[in-house]
Image (cartoon, coloured by chain):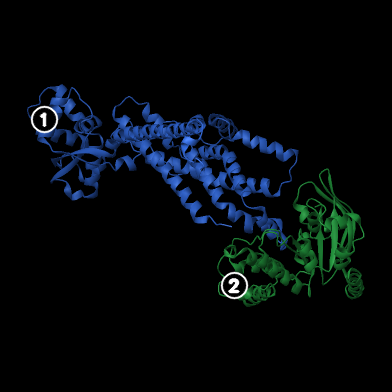
């Protein structure tokens, strides 16, 4: 009888199985480690960034004194002083100058502006007592969220005992530009800057890259020149991104005199940066289309261009789109080249057009991470969450487009 | 017995030459792939309204020459063609010949069925559409239906003209490719091993179709199967190492080859 169980083999079989088991174990360990690292990273960022999406408020009854607020001159009235006065009145036992100052510092500068806007919208409020919503400063905010311990603890506790403190979603974080005051700093400027920059990179990089790829792959004859170009494109894909920033500085700013810190220049630089990647991805996608399809088209008398645009390109499109979106996701997270062209400045205004000074999300993260105020720590983490979220959306879009356009042959 | 069939073949051969005019004639054709000399000094006359088969071992140049007839080699870098290939009286390698125009007269069917990943209708309609052959939509529909009928596929697909051509079976796909080729009204159809990817039943179906099509077209078929050449063709050309060894009436070629190499190949001694 033939021995088919493992007993029948010499020791070799056991060794082979042992080796296979080992290999599987290595794989499982690697996977587990990656998962742990990723999980830790996400946990750390989300737990740090989460509080930044909320802000602390307090509310107080304020009498809009017609003596202090002229009906014709609401815009120039000192609402901050009115608020300060009202808050002090709530705490008659606080007498020392030092403590009064500290008490006032719990209220954000924006509270006065908020009140002014309220009265501007409804001038009939003058002379009445209104319930004003006070945005608290970063220090008070962090304390009430339980994130810091401070010397002003007794005062903060007293404040909270008298005036109710509540937390709500911080819309300012989405609608403001950058600010020196942590509770007012928002991401809209950086997000718009990023959208302008990447938008321009798409507008320039996508058509240039795809048409270059089509030409090189489908029309150009192979000769010394096309070989040279190919080698150079492959090399360019590996050039460190900061070099592209230097190129942008020398060419777009110094030579062409385009504005500093502007998304239009950032977009041009990023377009150069992603061009090689787009060309390589598009060429690979075009090459993956079976040549028989093109031959079939040529065989019925299609011109070269018709064969490419009617048959080859539609089949290569999912691959081209995927490669392009991944390249642009990379551009979206790019920081170094944009530092070189001055997109690293502190810019409080939200850019209205691609030629306005702006910064981008990753640079904003870099800037905030550098600031000493504790509150910016969680703002930094929150900005990272948003950046990662946008990148995930881009990848999801890439997968969706690939599925949608994919055709089998 | 052998003598009898030879006699019959000779008879048929003389008839053929009498009936059919020459459609394609090649004179001293040399084809090079960069340094490689793929076709050497080839001259051949191919009759109209008949099937001509190119046979020979792999790499002998039969497909290369076939592709020279509608200038598909133009797309290959480093490929060069010398000599002349005349379609009727026009040398297709003349400067004023437009390849797009040429290919609408000389259609091609490939080794592997290669329908476009579009609907059956679109596959056939593509050629007439780019050449502007149809005046309007109904015209185009008629042309598609007529081509599918000629390719013997219409009955099988008439209810699903809008389903993808790639969903058909291999044999149906190849007939779809034939329909696509004849939709632009070519005079010549080149077939590069059209049955090599098909099972015997689908092959038989295609062979029948080729036999029908020969009434109206000049068909050239490259094949590895000598039985197929014997079954479908009237003229056979044997290629070996880039040269045309022998050409003649199919029956004569298979029963009484003149060249030793032809005889060896046909009897299966090499190849």
Q: Residue at x 56, y 69 (%)?
A: B162
Q: Residue at x 25, y 31 (%)?
A: A138
In the rendered image, residue A139, in percent from the top left (x then y), is placed at 23, 29
Helix, strand or loop at mark 2: helix
In the rendered image, residue A254, in percent from the top left (x then y), is placed at 57, 31
- Foreground residue among A234 and A163: A234
Of the two numbered discs 2 and 1 in the rendering, the one whose residue sits closer to the viewer:
2
- Foreground residue among B72 and B59: B59
Q: Which mark is residue B157?
A: 2
Looking at the rendered structure, whether the residues under marks 2 and 1 are on a common chain is answered as no
Q: Is residue A381 left or right of residue A261?
A: left
Which image quarter holds the C terminus of chain A?
bottom right
Q: Residue at x 59, y 75 (%)?
A: B158
Q: Which mark is residue A71?
A: none
Disc 2 from disc 1: Cα separation:
85 Å
Q: Is residue B134 above or below residue A232?
A: below
- Foreground residue among A103 and B97: B97
Asked if residue A354 shows in the view, the reply is no
Q: Is residue B24 left or right of residue B126?
A: right
* Mark 2 surroundings: few (<14), some (14-19) or many (≥20) residues within 10 A: some
Helix, strand or loop at mark 1: helix
Q: Which chain is blue?
A: A
Q: Colour of chain B?
A: green
What subunit carries mark 2? Answer: B
Q: Is residue A380 left or right of residue A83?
A: right
Residue B246 falls in image quadrant: bottom right
Q: Which mark is residue A158?
A: 1
Asked if residue A34 shows in the view, the reply is yes
* Mark 1 surroundings: few (<14), some (14-19) or many (≥20) residues within 10 A: few
């Amino acid at each position: 009888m033939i021995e088919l169980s493992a007993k029948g083999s010499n020791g070799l079989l056991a060794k082979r199985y042992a080796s296979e088991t080992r290999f599987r174990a290595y794989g499982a360990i690697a996977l587990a480690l990656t998962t742990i690292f990723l999980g830790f990273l996400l946990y750390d960022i989300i737990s740090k960034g989460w509080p930044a999406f909320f802000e602390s408020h307090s509310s107080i009854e304020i009498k809009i004194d017609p003596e202090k607020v002229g009906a014709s001159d609401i815009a120039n009235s000192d609402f901050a002083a009115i608020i300060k006065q009202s808050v002090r009145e709530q705490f008659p036992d606080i007498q020392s100058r030092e403590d009064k100052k500290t008490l006032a510092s719990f209220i954000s500068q924006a509270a006065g502006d908020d009140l002014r806007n309220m009265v501007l919208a409804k001038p009939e409020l003058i002379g009445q007592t209104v319930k004003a919503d006070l945005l608290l400063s970063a220090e008070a905010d962090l304390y009430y969220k339980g994130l810091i311990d401070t010397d002003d603890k007794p005062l903060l506790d007293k404040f909270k005992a008298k005036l109710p403190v509540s937390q709500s979603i911080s819309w300012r974080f989405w609608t403001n530009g950058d600010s020196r005051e942590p509770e007012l700093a928002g991401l809209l400027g950086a997000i718009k800057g990023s959208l302008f920059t990447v938008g321009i990179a798409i507008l320039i990089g996508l058509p240039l890259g795809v048409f270059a790829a089509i030409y090189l792959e489908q029309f150009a004859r192979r000769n010394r020149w096309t070989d040279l170009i190919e080698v150079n494109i492959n090399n360019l894909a590996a050039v460190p991104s900061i070099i592209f920033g230097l190129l942008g500085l020398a060419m777009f700013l110094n030579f062409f005199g385009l504005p500093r810190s502007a998304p239009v220049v950032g977009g041009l630089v990023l377009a150069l940066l992603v061009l090689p990647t787009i060309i390589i991805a598009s060429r690979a996608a075009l090459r993956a289309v079976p040549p028989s399809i093109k031959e079939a088209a040529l065989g019925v008398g299609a011109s070269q261009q018709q064969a490419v645009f009617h048959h080859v390109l539609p089949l290569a499109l999912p691959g081209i789109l995927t490669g392009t979106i991944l390249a642009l996701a990379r551009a979206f997270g790019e920081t170094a080249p944009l530092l070189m062209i001055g997109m690293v400045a502190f810019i409080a205004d939200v850019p209205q057009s691609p030629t306005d000074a702006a910064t981008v999300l990753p640079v904003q993260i870099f800037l905030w991470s550098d600031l000493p105020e504790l509150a910016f720590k969680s703002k930094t983490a929150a900005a990272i969450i948003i950046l990662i979220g946008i990148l995930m959306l881009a990848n999801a879009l890439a997968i969706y487009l690939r599925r949608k356009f994919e055709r089998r042959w | 017995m052998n003598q009898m069939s030879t006699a019959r073949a000779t008879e048929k051969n003389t008839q053929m030459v009498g009936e059919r005019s020459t459609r394609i004639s090649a004179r001293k054709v040399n084809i090079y792939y960069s340094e490689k000399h793929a076709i050497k000094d080839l001259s051949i006359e191919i009759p109209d309204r008949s099937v001509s088969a190119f046979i020979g071992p792999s790499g002998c140049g039969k497909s290369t020459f076939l592709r020279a007839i509608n200038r598909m080699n133009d797309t290959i870098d480093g490929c060069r063609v010398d000599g002349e290939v005349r379609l009727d009286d026009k040398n297709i390698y003349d400067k004023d010949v437009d390849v797009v125009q040429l290919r609408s007269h000389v259609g091609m069917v490939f080794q592997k069925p290669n329908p476009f990943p579009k609907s059956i209708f679109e596959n056939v309609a593509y050629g007439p559409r780019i050449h502007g052959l149809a005046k309007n939509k109904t015209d185009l529909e008629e042309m598609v239906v007529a081509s599918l009928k000629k390719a013997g596929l219409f009955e099988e697909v008439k209810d699903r003209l809008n389903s993808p051509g790639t969903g058909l079976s291999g044999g149906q796909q190849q007939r779809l490719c034939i329909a696509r080729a004849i939709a632009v009204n070519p005079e010549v159809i080149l077939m590069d091993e059209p049955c090599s990817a098909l099972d015997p039943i689908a092959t038989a179906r295609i062979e029948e179709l080729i036999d029908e099509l020969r009434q109206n077209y000049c068909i050239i078929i490259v094949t590895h199967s000598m039985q197929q050449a014997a079954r479908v063709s009237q003229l056979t050309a044997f290629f070996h190492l880039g040269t045309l060894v022998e050409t003649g009436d199919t029956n004569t070629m298979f029963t009484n080859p003149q060249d030793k190499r032809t005889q060896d190949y046909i009897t299966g001694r090499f190849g």
